[in-house]
Structures are given as C-alpha cells and as structure tokens.
Image (cartoon, rainbow, N blue to C red):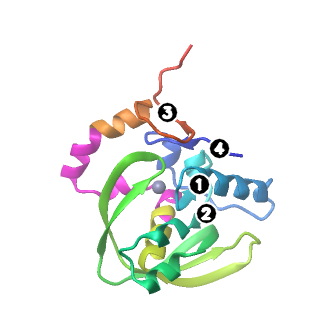
C-alpha cells in the first residue's frame, strides 16, 4: 500500500524518533509499504518519520543511483541492489574529509542543494529480522544512509545549509508545507487549507 509522504513543516519531521522492539505491530507489512511508497516516488531512501511514524526505522534501495553514467564502474556496482532495512540504527563513527553532494528529499520536492558530509561511516543496526549488524560504508551508499539517519534524529538536509541558502529557499519551503507544489506522488501537507 502506498502511504502519503509527510511534507516539510510537519512536526514529526523535527522529532527525535524512538527505538522499537521486535513486537512492533505489523512490522513486515509496514516495511513492505515503505518500500512500495519509496519506489512509487522514485526515491532511494525513506525514513519512518516521513510517513508520520516517529520511530527509528528507515529503508534504502540505491539501485536507481547506479544508472548515473558519471560514476565509476566500482561505484555503480556498489549501488546496484543495495536494499536494506535499518532498525534502531546508530552511526558509531564518521570519518574522512567532507564532500559535497546535491541532495534531495521526498518530503521536500523539487528542492536540491549541495550538502557536505564525511565519506566513511560505521553503523550498528538491526535488520528486518532484528539481527544485529555492524557495517562500514562509503561513497554514495554512506551518503544515503546519513541522509536517512538524520531523519530519525529529526534533522533535514535543509537544516545543514548555510544561513544564506536557507533564506533563499525559505519561500519555496513555505509553499511546500502549504501544498502549493506539483508532485506526482501522494503527500500530506501540514499547512494545507482544508478543501470542502
Ligand atoms: Zn529525506
């Protein structure tokens, strides 16, 4: 089932999300719905707060990024079929020199800006079967994980921009929260006037 994606301005996107336990109701259905919702919107990652749930859960499939012809063969290979569920994730290490990448977000349609992040991460998490995992990632895979991880901490990529950039996009963000935007997937806007 395709779920509505919560738009910029909804308080759930600003909340620090909480861990879940393995008796979380209908988790497998939720995961299937999150993947379906993400694919329908042509996203590479989706965090639970983006569908209105303040829990520490996100899903990723970086396959669409692999078609970028500017990437090396090794980078493309790392992205194909990288499909994961991250539950109660904790980034325990971030290292390397920060690099810029033009990020976007399904909750903030049509806004893309360069964001600086460190290239290497070590992350601990539970997979979809609640098995503990500890892995290192780099490049674009790490980038997508860092973006989604920020969501479960209540942080958006727009929070990481310079104050000048923030000022420049403020009007567009306000429009998004009011639903004054054309978007071809299902969304829920916090400040939309009720239609009658
Ligand atoms: Zn996002």
Measure the C-alpha gap from mark 3 to mark 2. 23 Å
Measure the C-alpha gap from mark 4 to mark 3. 15 Å
Residue identified by numbered label 4: 3
Would you call the spot at circle 2 few (<14 residues within 10 Å), some (14-19), or many (20 or more)?
many
Q: Pinpoint residue 188: horizontal percent, then vertical percent.
A: 54, 36
The response on whether ligand 1 sits within 8 Å of label 2 is no
Tags 4 and 1 in contact by the CB under 8 Å rule? no
Left or right? Give the position of 90 relative to 128.
left
Residue identified by numbered label 3: 190
Measure the C-alpha gap from mark 2 to mark 1. 9 Å
Q: Pinpoint residue 60: horizontal percent, then vertical percent.
A: 58, 66
Tell which circle, 2 or 4, labels the residue nearer the N-terminal end. 4
User: Which SS class for mark 4?
Assistant: loop
Tags 2 and 1 in contact by the CB under 8 Å rule? yes
Q: Main secondary structure of the magenta part?
A: helix
Residue identified by numbered label 2: 59
Q: Determine whether 47 is above or below 60 in the image.
A: above
User: Which SS class for mark 2?
Assistant: strand
- The reply to whether the magenta stretch includes residue 181 is no
Tags 4 and 3 in contact by the CB under 8 Å rule? no
Q: Residue at x 61, y 63 (%)?
A: 59
């Amino acid at each position: 089932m395709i779920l509505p994606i919560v738009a910029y301005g909804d308080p759930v996107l600003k909340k620090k999300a909480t861990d879940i336990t393995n008796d979380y109701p209908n988790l497998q259905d939720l995961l299937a719905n999150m993947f379906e919702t993400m694919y329908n919107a042509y996203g590479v990652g989706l965090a639970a707060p983006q569908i209105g749930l303040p829990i520490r859960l996100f899903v990723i499939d970086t396959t669409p990024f692999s078609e970028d012809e500017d990437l090396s063969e090794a980078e493309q290979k790392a992205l194909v079929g990288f499909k994961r569920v991250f539950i109660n994730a904790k980034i325990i290490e971030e290292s390397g020199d920060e690099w810029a990448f033009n990020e976007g977000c399904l909750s903030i349609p049509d806004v893309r800006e360069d964001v600086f992040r460190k290239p290497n991460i070590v992350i601990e998490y539970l997979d979809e079967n609640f098995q503990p995992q500890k892995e290192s990632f780099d490049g674009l895979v790490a980038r997508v994980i860092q973006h989604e991880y920020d969501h479960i901490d209540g942080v958006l990529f727009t929070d990481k921009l310079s104050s000048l950039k923030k000022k420049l996009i403020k009007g567009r963000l306000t429009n998004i929260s009011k639903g004054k935007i054309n978007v071809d997937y299902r969304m829920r806007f916090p400040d939309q006037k009720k239609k009658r």
